[in-house]
């Protein structure tokens, strides 16, 4: 039973401040990890509906750092990343944005994450 609970532990990190955003972006950059950031809002039903898919993708792609940012809690980060609609998914490599997906389209998001992770593996190999 305990191992099942460990499997259910979230791989998505909730960003609660500009400082934590900067910390995770710098940490991922130093480790060569791509970042997938889900900009969400509790009042946005398409964003909330994407949460289980985002969790699933975080488990599917362990070679990437998955962050979730509530735009109402961390407005400065949403503004810096030019997030104007929810949900928005920002893909980053080496600390810089390389792609942005606006809207709740799990298959498109999965496809772009797969491309991001594969491109990162090529550089590491």
Image (cartoon, grey):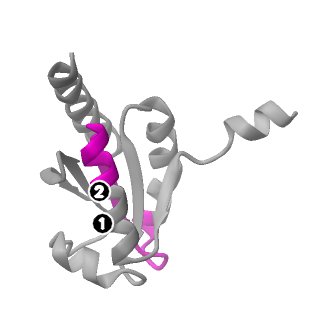
Q: Residue at x 53, y 49 (%)?
A: 52
Q: Quick one: SS at disc 1?
A: helix
Which class describes the residues within 10 Å of circle 2: few (<14), some (14-19), or many (20+)?
A: many
Q: Which residue is mark 1?
A: 22
Q: Which mark is residue 123?
A: none
Q: In the image, is 85 to the left or to the right of 58?
A: left
Q: Quick one: SS at disc 2?
A: helix
The quadrant in which the C terminus is found is top left
Q: CA distance from mark 1 to mark 2?
A: 5 Å
Residue interval drawn in magenta: 26-47
Q: Residue at x 20, y 29 (%)?
A: 120
Q: Is residue 97 visible?
A: yes
Residue placed furthest toward the top: 125
Residue placed furthest toward the front: 30
Above or below residue 64? Residue 87 is: below
Magenta stretch contains residue 32? yes
Q: Residue at x 85, y 36 (%)?
A: 2
- The answer to which image quadrant residue 80 occupies is bottom left
Task: Return the x and y of residue 108 as percentages of the image width and height.
Answer: 25, 40
Q: In the image, is 24 to the left or to the right of 7?
A: left
Magenta stretch contains residue 64? no
Above or below residue 57? Residue 100 is: below
Q: Residue at x 49, y 63 (%)?
A: 14
Task: Return the x and y of residue 40 as percentages of the image width and height.
Answer: 39, 69
Q: In the image, is 41 to the left or to the right of 101?
A: right
Q: How many marks?
A: 2
- The answer to which image quadrant residue 70 occupies is bottom left
Task: Return the x and y of residue 69 as percentages of the image width and height.
Answer: 39, 68
Q: Which residue is mark 2?
A: 25
**CB atoms at circles 1 and 2 under 8 Å apart?**
yes
Q: In the image, is 88 to the left or to the right of 73?
A: left
């Amino acid at each position: 039973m305990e191992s099942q609970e460990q499997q259910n532990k979230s791989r998505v990190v909730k960003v609660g401040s500009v400082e934590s955003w900067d910390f995770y972006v710098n940490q991922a950059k130093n480790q060569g990890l791509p970042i997938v950031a889900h900009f969400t809002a509790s009042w946005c039903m398409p964003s909330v509906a994407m949460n289980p898919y985002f969790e699933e993708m975080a488990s599917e792609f362990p070679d990437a750092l998955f962050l979730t940012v509530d735009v109402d809690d961390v407005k400065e980060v949403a503004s810096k990343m030019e997030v104007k609609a929810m949900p928005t998914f920002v893909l980053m490599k080496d600390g810089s944005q390389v792609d942005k997906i606006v809207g709740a389209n799990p298959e498109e998001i999965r496809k772009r994450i797969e491309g991001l992770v594969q491109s990162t593996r090529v550089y590491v190999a």
